[in-house]
């Protein structure tokens, strides 16, 4: 249907048919969603009423292509809820979520449709399908099974109810966390900011000014919180901010997530057990490289054993250093760790992240990261101001392949704001596929929360923020290089514990002198980042690396503890949490704090039973990058092999098959241990 008044319901009148953000108003979402659902219902009806014998084209491909209009609007809504939300959008989402979940359930629990899918899955037709077609058939069949298609009728109704409650509670969890984060302001005077670099003080003053207040305001957004904990000399102020950050969504107010966490944990367990799995983790891991919780725990325990001795030494070293400054009775607490670690790092390596900022001006970093992709893959980036964006901070680029052909659209969204959730992520506004019209190219976005420019300085990044940029850009390359026939197998639509490989491998370049020399120049003088600084970066890259590993493992342990439960949880969340991650804890636990109520990754972000993926993929990326190190970090042959065998293939084959095709062997943990300096 063509509807000139609703931009979602007509062909986008924009370059490359990009999302017409300038035309979209909140009132457009609901009618477009309703229209999209009605349209897909007709498409499903046409499949189930088709009198021809079910085959791959008239059932599997037809299903794959259904719902295009609905997907178009829900993709925009979902992305805007994270990147540029409002009370109005959240109200729309709350209203639409149950309807969308019911619509999805009506498809996956459609008996006539599943009968057709099952008949193809069990027929000899499979033998003549290509590997990608077989993967689509396999994925379609499994997704219906995992969505309750084989359940008896009474359990199907229970499954529907569970799915609806899950979607609503996930949405509410995210909304509460964003509102709680935005509600907090730490209002300070200049005399309280002793130890903080001038650039950070300026940013706090800028925040106060933007809020129409005097003085300095620190918030719970990462670019504000992290430097305060690293540099503020006043221990009582560090403690106050630490407690504010780590007790979010625990307070006796409308944003408390305690009951929502219990609900989410128990709903995921209920869904899994309805489908015949003993735990939520077993349900999830069935579709992961790890395959089961035993393999996840095997990796976690292997890394705990390898890193724990070094981590305890690192902790002891920071503790002794703090005692030298504060006295022999001083006991380091969680709000002290970042401060004394940073001081010790400065002493040992003459390394101070703030000294590096002038060399990491955002536009130069962008040029460097884009230039790395050009050097490896031959692709180029050209900003196009005629492509609509959803906020003035956002830029849109056309990306061209080495032969000059159009490859993708890339949006960049770098700065924090109250309408954006915390963290950093890559997403797609349109994925890639191939049909009779040709190769339809993707529109991807990288969204971050970097240090903002001030009235007298451009955005100057920390070294950690440069790492974050490289990480999310790696995800973007995975999306932009997608080259598959079917959208649902395209780009980042891969096993969750494989999706971090393309992102984490890019982080390796951050400590490579050859790469840093391409862009790291002082924003005022143009002086290149001195080699002595680069050497300090490399030397400091192993500093407290084991502590950082155990921190990640603690999150993985917490995640697995929640989702390997076999009985519903009715206990105390804080007590459970502290027991779950005890094997990886190095600092005293603070009774009032609670991470689970703000742990979006595992509660609302798709990483339930999957947080281990970061360490799993780290094993892969260390092993994979060792080939770049061996052949030369800019070696085009290695890069093109990675593009051809991993980045372009999406989920068309099993990840281990793709990895071995690139690397020539299965990965081992040894490259990671060597990179981290744990072994020689």
Image (cartoon, helix red, strand yellow):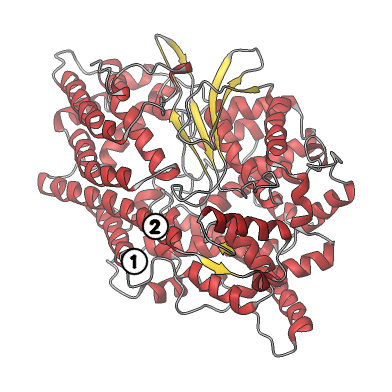
Q: Examine the image and state in which quarter residue 4 appears.
A: top left
Which residue is at the front of the view, 669 or 25?
25
Badge 2: residue crowd in 10 Å (few <14, some 14–19, many ≥20): some
Q: Earlier in the sequence, mark 2 or mark 1?
A: 2
Q: What kind of element bears circle 1?
A: loop
The residue that disc 1 covers is 256
**Which residue is labeled 2 in the image?**
179
Query: In the image, residue 261 lies at what x, y percent?
Result: 33, 63
- Which residue is located at x 83 percent, y 68 percent? 347
* Left or right of 106, for residue 368: right
Identify the residue at horizontal 32%, vertical 43% (top origin). Answer: 89
Quadrant showing the N terminus:
top left
- Where residue 385 appears, x then y in whole percent? 55, 23
Residue 334 at least partly seen? no
Query: Residue 68, relative to residue 453: is it above or below?
Result: above
Q: In the visual, does 499 lie left or right of 540?
A: left
Q: Position of residue 16 (x, y in %)?
A: 47, 17
Q: Are marks 2 and 1 in contact (CB under 8 Å)?
A: no
**What is the count of numbered marks?**
2
**Real-space Cα distance between discs 2 and 1?**
11 Å
Q: Nearer the viewer, residue 200 or 128?
A: 200
State the residue at coordinates (32%, 61%).
265
Q: Secondary structure at mark 2?
A: helix
């Amino acid at each position: 249907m063509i509807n000139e008044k609703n931009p979602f319901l007509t062909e986008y009148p924009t370059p490359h048919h990009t999302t017409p953000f300038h035309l979209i108003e909140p009132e457009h979402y609901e009618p477009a969603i309703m229209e999209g659902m009605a349209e897909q219902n007709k498409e499903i009806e046409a499949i189930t009423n088709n009198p021809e014998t079910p085959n791959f084209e008239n059932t599997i491909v037809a299903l794959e292509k259904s719902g295009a209009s609905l997907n178009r609007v829900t993709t925009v809504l979902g992305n805007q809820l994270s990147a540029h939300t409002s009370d109005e959008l959240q109200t729309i989402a709350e209203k639409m979520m149950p309807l969308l979940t019911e619509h999805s359930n009506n498809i996956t629990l459609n008996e006539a449709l599943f009968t057709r899918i099952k008949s193809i899955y069990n027929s000899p037709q499979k033998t003549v399908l290509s590997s990608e077609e077989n993967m689509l058939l396999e994925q379609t069949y499994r997704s219906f099974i995992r969505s309750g298609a084989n359940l008896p009728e009474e359990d199907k109704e229970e499954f529907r109810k569970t799915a609806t409650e899950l979607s609503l509670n996930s949405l509410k969890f995210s909304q509460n966390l964003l509102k709680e984060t935005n509600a907090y302001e730490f209002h300070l005077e200049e005399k309280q900011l002793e130890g903080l670099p001038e650039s950070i003080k300026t940013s706090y003053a800028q925040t106060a000014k933007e809020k129409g207040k005097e003085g300095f305001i620190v918030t719970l957004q990462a670019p504000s919180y992290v430097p305060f904990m690293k540099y503020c000399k006043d221990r009582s102020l560090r403690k106050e901010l630490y407690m504010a950050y780590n007790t979010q969504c625990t307070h006796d107010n409308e944003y408390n997530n305690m009951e929502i966490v219990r609900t989410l944990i128990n709903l995921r367990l209920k869904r899994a057990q309805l489908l015949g799995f003993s735990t939520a983790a077993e349900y999830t891991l069935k579709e992961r490289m790890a395959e089961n919780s035993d393999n996840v725990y095997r990796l976690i325990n292997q890394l705990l054993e390898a890193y724990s001795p070094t981590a305890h030494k690192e902790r002891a070293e920071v503790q002794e250093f703090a005692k030298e400054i504060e006295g022999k009775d001083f006991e380091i607490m969680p709000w002290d760790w970042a401060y004394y670690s940073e001081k010790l790092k400065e002493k040992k390596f003459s390394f101070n992240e703030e000294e590096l900022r002038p060399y990491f001006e955002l536009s130069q970093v962008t040029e460097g990261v884009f230039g790395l992709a050009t050097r490896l893959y031959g692709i180029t980036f050209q900003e196009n101001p005629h492509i609509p964006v959803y906020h003035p901070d956002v830029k849109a680029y056309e990306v061209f392949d080495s032969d000059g052909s159009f490859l993708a659209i890339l949006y960049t969204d770098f700065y924090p704001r109250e309408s954006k959730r915390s963290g950093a992520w890559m997403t797609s506004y349109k994925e890639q596929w191939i049909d009779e019209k040709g190769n339809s190219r993707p529109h991807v976005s990288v969204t971050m929360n970097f240090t903002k420019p001030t009235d007298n300085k451009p955005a100057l990044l920390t070294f950690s923020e440069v790492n974050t940029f490289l990480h999310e850009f790696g995800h973007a390359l995975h999306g932009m290089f997608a080259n598959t026939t079917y959208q649902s197998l395209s780009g980042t639509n891969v096993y969750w514990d494989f999706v971090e490989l393309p992102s984490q491998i890019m982080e390796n370049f951050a400590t490579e002198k050859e790469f840093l020399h391409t862009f790291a120049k002082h924003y005022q003088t143009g002086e290149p980042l001195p080699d002595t600084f680069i050497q300090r970066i490399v030397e400091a890259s192993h500093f407290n690396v084991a502590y950082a590993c155990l921190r990640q493992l603690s999150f993985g342990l917490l995640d697995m503890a929640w989702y390997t439960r076999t009985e519903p949880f009715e206990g105390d969340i804080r007590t459970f949490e502290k027991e779950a991650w005890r094997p990886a804890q190095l600092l005293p636990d603070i009774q009032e704090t609670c991470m689970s109520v703000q742990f979006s990754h595992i509660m609302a972000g798709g990483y339930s039973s999957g947080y281990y993926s970061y360490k799993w993929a780290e094993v892969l990326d260390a092993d994979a990058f060792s080939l770049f190190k061996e052949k030369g970090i800019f070696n085009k042959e290695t890069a093109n092999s990675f593009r051809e065998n991993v980045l372009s293939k999406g989920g068309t084959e099993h990840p281990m098959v793709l990895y071995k095709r690139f690397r020539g062997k299965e990965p081992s943990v040894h490259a990671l241990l060597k990179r981290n300096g744990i072994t020689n």
